[in-house]
């Protein structure tokens, strides 16, 4: 333990004893400062950033309790309780010059106080302020107690900030913040750029400003810069103390911006250090299989596939080759929009594993998809001589035993199935590669689950949801990522339209025209989240209605989660063969289904679906040579729903859609939760601060690369900082 660290711990212990002592003042003998005048003096002699907030001037026991609601327990928390925004109240406006709709600060005398009854039960208090250029009324709603307060201030100077509006009898100012002018005190709320803090019940801006000012005066000088000096000077960052001061009470707008940049950098830097450490702990060299990349395998692949790989597919295959040839375990995320050709890339990886004498597993989220993979890989696998097999729940017991036996003996080289493949009792002889087709599902399989089975294969996770840069730099920041960023040539973008329910008949008529031209159509029924049974019933009813009333002469099929596997197989087979014109379905067709001749996707009650889901559904069409259409039917009752449908109609770009989705739903779902293992961010915003995020990431990863245990002298503060901030989070331990 370093001297500084042990000193901190001793200080903390002292504080604990100080607190207890205050509650039980009799126990004098244990006072850390024997012979001193008592606890209150002792506390000021032993102040540190860990001192309970209660001891900051102006706080006290009762208010300290309220502050805990804001997550403020000690001085450090208080110093890092940053404003939500700022208001520039550097200059007072003359009342006579106030303009309608302007936010402004004024200074003047209280000349009248009135309470105005209204017909609804709202009471309005109006306070007239005179600054000699004119008179304006401050307007307060339902704050009865203010009447007395202002009466007492009659004739006194106050300052006020709010929204000026012209009313019948002159200017009124609403949303008011105000305070009495006291010449002796440093004005915290006026004549400067004023911080506006996040509050909770029982806490006022003025109070928070005051106690934070007190905390700054006494404690800011104790803040230690943990960023290495090299990083500070390279990025011309403001020092920590100056930054914290300016984040609360900026000297100027520029100073505030610089302070913010510095603090955001630091926060993101810590996050990236944690990610770098976590990545490092997974990448231990010597633990993975070192596959040899066979010289001729690419030619074999080329001959087995009915198309030429796109440059993007080529590039990501090379990235995967490098991982597989390396001595650490591959842990790669492959992202590519629907239809970008991820399966062919997976096949390349599978081929490398098999050629090296290892087995591979390909896992899909549903049985339909597993079968789909099995079918679509059949041809190529045959040509490549890969012995492949399918394991799904509906197999007969005898067949299942056979599949198990072949996997255990090593005869099966590629086993395709659902996640059950690795969760259940399947044994492999020598599993070298696991490919997981997660499609749009966020979340990455824990390597731990595999390691528990004594397996340490290379892992390739495929996802069809483009993951916004924001997340690949944070939540997924410890994974290697490959992106297929172009579609195979000749694809026509899907034309997307949003129609109101009143236009439904017209939509059906247009669909019929395309069916007459030989195309096929999907109709997705409204989303019912309550139960699969209800969902199945809705699909059945829709199919019956369409068959009876709309398309009596056409061949309809019905697919939902409760259709038996054998029936499902037959249905999909028929649809693929063109023997069904209209496939009515629930969202089970959301992922993976690939029927190029199907060129129309009709989504009923589209406003109930999420953006990502709609994009996935749309991805089922546009897979062949024909122009495809996606028609979303829905009246979109909310702004958010309208925004979703409009976004989808406007763009086919999965990245834009994913970003939009994230904004609409908020990053909280992925970020800042314990689940993601990320520390919560206080000041950085992962949408706004991407450029800083990238800089911080680069620095952090370089530091961990050069000093994996942060044991060098220049990194000692970093280590302490990390320990403190990441305490309790499931991140790699710093040792
Ligand atoms: P996804 O990334 O959605 O899983 P798939 O791998 O299912 O995409 O590929 C979608 C379709 O595109 C398939 O029919 C596949 O055969 C075809 N495909 C894949 N790569 C190419 C390519 N380079 N050129 C032409 N067609 C391709
Ligand atoms: Mg796929």
Image: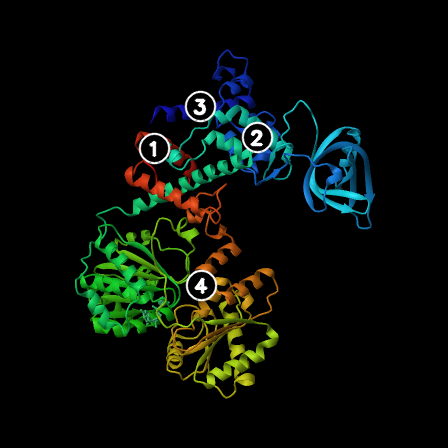
Outermost residue, top direction? 35
Q: Earlier in the sequence, mark 4 or mark 1?
A: 4
Going from N to C along the chain, the mark reached first, 4 or 3, is 3
Q: Is residue 163 above or below residue 183?
A: below
Image disc number at residue 653: 4
Q: CA distance from mark 1 to mark 2?
A: 30 Å
* Residue at disc 4, secondary structure: loop
Residue annotated with mark 3: 11
Counting from the top left corner in percent of width and height, residue 274 is at 37, 42
Badge 1, how many Cα within 10 Å: few under 14, some, many 20+?
A: some
Q: CA distance from mark 4 to mark 1?
A: 42 Å
Front-lying residue, 490 or 353? 490
Which label lies toward us, 4 or 2? 4
Q: Which mark is residue 715?
A: 1
Q: CA distance from mark 2 to mark 3?
A: 22 Å
Its colouring scheme is: rainbow
């Amino acid at each position: 333990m370093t001297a500084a660290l042990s000193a901190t711990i001793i200080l903390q212990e002292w504080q604990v004893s100080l607190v207890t002592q205050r509650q039980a003042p009799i126990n004098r003998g244990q006072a850390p400062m024997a012979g001193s005048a008592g606890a209150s003096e002792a506390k000021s002699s032993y102040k540190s950033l860990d001192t309970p907030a209660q001891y900051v001037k102006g706080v006290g026991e009762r208010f300290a309790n309220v502050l805990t609601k804001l997550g403020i327990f000690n001085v450090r928390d208080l110093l890092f309780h940053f404003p939500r925004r700022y208001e520039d109240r550097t200059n007072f406006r003359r009342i006579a010059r106030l303009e309608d709709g302007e936010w402004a600060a004024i200074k003047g005398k209280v000349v009248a106080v009135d309470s105005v009854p209204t017909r609804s039960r709202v009471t309005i208090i109006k306070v007239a302020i005179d600054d000699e250029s004119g008179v304006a009324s401050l307007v307060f709603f339902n704050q009865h107690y203010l009447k007395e307060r202002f009466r007492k201030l009659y004739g006194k100077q106050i300052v006020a900030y709010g929204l000026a509006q012209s009313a019948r009898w002159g200017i009124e100012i609403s949303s008011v913040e105000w305070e009495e002018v006291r010449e002796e005190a440093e004005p915290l709320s006026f004549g400067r750029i004023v911080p506006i803090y996040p509050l909770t019940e029982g806490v006022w801006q003025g109070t928070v400003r005051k106690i934070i000012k007190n905390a700054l005066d006494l404690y800011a000088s104790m803040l230690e810069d943990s960023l290495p000096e090299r990083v500070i000077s390279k990025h011309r960052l403001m020092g920590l103390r100056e930054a914290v001061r300016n984040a609360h009470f900026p000297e100027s707008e520029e100073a505030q911006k610089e302070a913010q940049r510095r603090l955001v950098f630091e926060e993101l830097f810590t996050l990236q250090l944690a990610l770098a450490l976590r990545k490092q702990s997974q990448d231990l060299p010597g633990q993975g299989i070192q596959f040899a990349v066979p010289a001729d395998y690419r030619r074999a692949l080329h001959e087995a596939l009915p198309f030429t790989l796109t440059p993007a597919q080529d590039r990501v295959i090379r990235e995967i080759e490098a991982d597989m040839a390396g001595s650490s375990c591959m842990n790669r995320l492959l992202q590519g929009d629907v239809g970008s050709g991820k399966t062919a890339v997976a096949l390349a990886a599978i081929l490398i594993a098999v050629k090296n004498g290892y087995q591979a597993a390909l896992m899909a989220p549903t049985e339909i998809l597993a079968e789909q993979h099995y079918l679509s890989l059949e041809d190529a696998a045959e040509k490549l001589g890969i012995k492949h097999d399918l394991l799904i729940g509906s197999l007969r017991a005898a067949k299942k035993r056979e599949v198990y036996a072949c996997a255990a003996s090593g005869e099966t080289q590629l086993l395709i199935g659902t996640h059950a493949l690795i969760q259940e009792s399947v044994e492999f002889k020598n599993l070298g590669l696991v490919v997981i087709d997660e499609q749009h599902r966020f979340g990455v399989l824990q390597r731990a689950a595999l390691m528990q089975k004594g397996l340490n294969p290379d892992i390739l996770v495929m996802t069809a949801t483009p993951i916004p840069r924001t997340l690949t730099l944070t939540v997924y920041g410890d994974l290697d990522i490959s992106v297929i960023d172009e579609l195979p040539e000749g694809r026509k973008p899907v034309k997307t339209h949003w129609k109101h329910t009143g236009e439904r008949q017209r939509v059906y008529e247009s669909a019929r025209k395309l069916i007459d031209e030989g195309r096929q159509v999907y109709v997705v029924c409204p989303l019912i989240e309550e139960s699969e049974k209800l969902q199945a019933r809705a699909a059945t009813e829709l199919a019956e209605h369409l068959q009876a009333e709309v398309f009596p002469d056409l061949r309809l099929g019905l697919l939902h989660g409760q259709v038996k596997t054998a029936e499902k197989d037959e249905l999909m087979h028929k649809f693929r063969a063109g023997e069904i014109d209209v496939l009515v379905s629930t969202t089970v067709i959301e992922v993976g289904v690939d029927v190029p001749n199907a060129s129309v996707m009709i989504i009923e009650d589209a406003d109930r679906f999420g953006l990502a889901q709609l994009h996935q559904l749309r991805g089922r069409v546009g897979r062949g040579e024909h122009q495809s259409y996606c028609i979303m039917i829905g009246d979109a009752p909310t702004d958010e729903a309208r925004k979703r449908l409009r976004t989808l109609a406007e763009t086919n770009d999965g990245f834009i859609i994913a970003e939009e989705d994230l904004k609409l739903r908020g990053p909280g779902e992925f970020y800042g939760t314990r689940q993601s293992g990320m520390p919560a961010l206080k000041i950085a915003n992962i949408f706004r601060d991407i450029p800083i995020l990238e800089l911080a990431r680069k620095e952090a990863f370089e530091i961990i690369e050069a000093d994996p245990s942060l044991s060098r002298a220049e990194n000692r503060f970093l280590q302490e900082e990390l320990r403190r901030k990441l305490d309790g989070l499931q991140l790699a331990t710093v040792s």
